[in-house]
Image: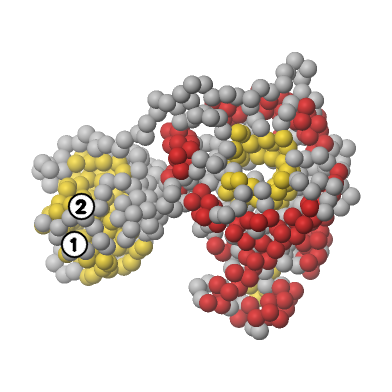
């Protein structure tokens, strides 16, 4: 499933007679001491995987070999890449058939082969990302308000074609494709994708404007979509309700079809994407399962965002479907580290024990090696695995100082005794969001304290690298903290997280290295200041953060860049406590 908000794979989700030598799939049983195996779903882009009958046979044989339970097959093209979005991979009388598939019914081939192997097939049917419909029906085009002008929306790259989710003719067309599939093919389920807008400023076509104005008495064209307001919230709520009603209409279509018990699911974006008008709570009563896209690293979250009970995608999804029998099928990436999979599987098992199936997405062709790895992990975490402990790393530092990579990212520290200066490095890190990744040189202190430092230089770093001083309540990556930082290209920033695993907030000012930074705690008041000479100070920000008496104070460096030769030099360090 892919979508325009990210370049890697982002939104949308996301076989055949088997070789005669392949036996029937045997359910995997957990050995003594093992966890019960997760079911496996793989999401397949047809244009990449199924170009002929041999492709189907080969993939289904692999899927059976490695214990795949469900193949979610791209029945209607999702992206505007190899094939225009909106084209289909089956024998349709409604939608245009993708080139090369006129005489190759990929859907039927996959169903025949998969069912022979005991594997279910879900028809993955993207909805409102549809170039074919966009170009054929001008009146269906999604319109965005750009500089006060209604403009057909084609994405940031000019090649993402959306149709209007609210237009009744668009809805009827997309629903007719779903009906055609379930009436003519024995699929085991239908999964919707791309049931959303792309931002607050759409759809603003005349059709939608008239419908909205008739209900609320004012035109959405008068809303400032760039700023939060009661009217923007009302607009977004209304759009979200329209999406929910659309899913309800699809459920009605299925109920009236020849296969009324057909499973219906939806791939959904993370809850942070409020602007797209998608909320599973609006359609939870119409679906059998929901597949939240849990690509934590693509969304710039820490791994616990997937499984935490305090925040994150599974908590949010679980809360929104509360009181229903809707199953959650987390959709995971296929390129994480073993420790990340161990951790996430453990978190899901402990915090969301009702999750029985995991779904995996690959943007291109599925290599056999990836299916093998997924199959190896079905009972993870392994009995001998434990969370890698974050520990201080060895460094020659003045008495009382310690060094640690918080968030388990690489960095090191040296201290020059004659110059009395610290040099820190860090790569692929950031202090932001709900969890941090940074190199931290620190001391424990109690009660009121103040740290002053001169950031003398920052070399070979990303423009959003942050070098400065910090006070943290603990050394976990989601801890409450306040910091006063200097960036190479974006001035100075006073940042803080007022509650554990909460969002990070910043206040900024103009500054560049070399500059002096000061961070102080008085009670629960934290104040960050900057100076060009270490004498005359400018306050950048102040905030109240309830913290324990003992905290950790020190020098912090994060750097989103990957140049291993990066370094930040800190001098004239003083701590008063």
State the residue at coordinates (60%, 24%). Answer: 28
Whichever of labels 2 and 1 marks the residue nearer the N terminus, that label is 1
**Do we see residue 549 in this rendering?**
yes
Residue 384, quarter of the rendered image = top left
Against 534, residue 205 (above or below) is below
Q: Where residue 468 is drawn, which disc sits there? A: none
Q: Residue furthest front?
A: 323
Instruction: Name the residue: 33% across, 47% down.
Output: 477
Q: Residue at x 77, y 23 (%)?
A: 18
Q: Secondary structure at mark 1?
A: strand
Report the Cα–Cα distance between label 2 and label 1: 10 Å
Q: Is residue 323 left or right of residue 420?
A: right
The spot of residue 420 in percent (x, y) is 12, 47
- Locate residue 55: give its quadrant: top right
Residue at the spot of label 1: 521
Q: Is residue 457 above or below residue 416?
A: below
Question: Where does the image place residue 559, in percent across and percent down from the top left?
Answer: 36, 48
Task: Estimate how packed mark 1 is, as few (under 14), some (14 to 19) or many (20 or more) residues with alpha carbons within 10 Å.
Answer: many
Q: Are marks 2 and 1 in contact (CB under 8 Å)?
A: yes
Classed neighbour count for the residue bearing mark 2: other residues with Cα under 10 Å, few (<14), some (14–19), many (≥20): many
Who is closer to the viewer here, 261 or 103? 261
Residue 551, numbered label = 2
Image location (x, y in percent) of residue 271: 53, 57
Point out the residue furthest to the bottom here: 217
Report the label total: 2
Left or right: 342 as drawn, with respect to 46: left
Quarter holding the C terminus is: bottom left
**What residue is at 49 percent from the left and 21 percent from the top?**
32
Give left or right: position of 143 versus 91: left
Q: Secondary structure at mark 2?
A: strand
* Up-down relation of residue 137 to residue 554 (above or below): below
Quarter residue 402 falls in: top left
């Amino acid at each position: 499933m892919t979508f325009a908000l990210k370049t890697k794979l982002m939104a949308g989700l996301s076989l055949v007679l088997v070789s005669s030598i392949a036996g029937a799939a045997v359910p995997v049983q957990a050995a003594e001491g093992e966890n019960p195996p997760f079911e496996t779903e793989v999401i397949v882009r047809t244009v990449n995987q199924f170009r002929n009958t041999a492709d189907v046979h080969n993939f289904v044989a692999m899927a059976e070999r490695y214990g795949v339970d469900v193949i979610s097959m791209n029945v209607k093209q999702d992206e505007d890449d190899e094939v225009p979005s909106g084209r289909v991979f089956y024998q349709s009388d409604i939608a245009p058939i993708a080139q090369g598939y006129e005489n190759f019914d990929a859907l039927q081939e996959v169903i025949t082969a998969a069912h022979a192997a005991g594997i279910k097939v879900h028809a993955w049917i993207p909805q409102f990302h549809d170039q074919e419909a966009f170009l054929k029906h001008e009146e269906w085009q999604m319109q965005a308000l750009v500089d006060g002008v209604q403009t057909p929306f084609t994405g940031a790259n000019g090649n993402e074609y959306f149709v209007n989710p609210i237009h009744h003719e668009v809805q009827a067309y997309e629903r007719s494709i779903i009906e055609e599939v379930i009436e003519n093919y024995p699929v085991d389920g239908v999964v919707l994708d791309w049931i959303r807008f792309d931002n607050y400023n759409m759809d603003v076509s005349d059709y939608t404007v008239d419908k909205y104005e008739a209900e609320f008495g004012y035109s959405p064209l008068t809303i400032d979509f760039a700023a939060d307001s009661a009217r923007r919230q009302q607009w977004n709520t209304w759009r979200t309700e329209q999406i929910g009603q659309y899913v309800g209409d699809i459920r009605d279509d299925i109920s009236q079809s020849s296969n009324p018990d057909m499973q219906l699911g939806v791939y959904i974006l993370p809850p942070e994407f409020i602007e797209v008008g998608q909320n599973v709570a609006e359609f939870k009563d119409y679906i059998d399962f929901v597949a939240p896209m849990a690509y934590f690293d693509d969304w710039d979250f820490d791994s616990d965002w997937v499984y935490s009970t305090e925040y994150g995608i599974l908590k949010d999804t679980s809360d929104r479907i509360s009181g229903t029998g809707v199953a959650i099928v987390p959709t995971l990436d296929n390129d994480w580290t073993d420790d990340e999979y161990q951790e996430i599987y453990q978190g899901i098992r402990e915090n969301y024990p009702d999750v029985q199936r995991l779904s995996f997405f690959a943007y291109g062709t599925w290599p056999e090696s990836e299916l093998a790895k997924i199959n190896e992990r079905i009972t993870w975490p392994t009995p001998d695995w434990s969370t890698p402990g974050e520990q201080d790393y060895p460094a020659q530092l003045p008495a009382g100082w310690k060094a640690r990579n918080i968030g388990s990212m690489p960095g090191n520290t040296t201290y020059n005794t004659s110059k009395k200066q610290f040099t820190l490095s860090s790569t692929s890190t950031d202090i932001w969001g709900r969890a941090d990744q940074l190199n931290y040189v620190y001391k424990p202190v109690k009660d009121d304290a103040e740290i002053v430092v001169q950031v003398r230089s920052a070399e070979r770093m990303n423009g959003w690298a942050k070098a400065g001083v910090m006070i943290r309540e603990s050394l976990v990556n989601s801890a409450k903290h306040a910091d006063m930082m200097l960036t190479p290209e974006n001035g100075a920033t006073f940042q803080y997280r007022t509650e554990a695993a909460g969002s990070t907030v910043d206040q900024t000012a103009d500054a560049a290295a070399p500059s002096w930074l000061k961070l102080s705690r008085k009670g629960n008041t934290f104040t960050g200041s900057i100076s060009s000479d270490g004498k005359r100070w400018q306050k950048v920000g102040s905030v109240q953060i309830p913290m324990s008496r003992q905290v950790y104070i020190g020098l912090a460096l994060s750097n989103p860049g990957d140049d291993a030769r990066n370094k930040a030099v800190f001098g004239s360090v003083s701590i008063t406590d």
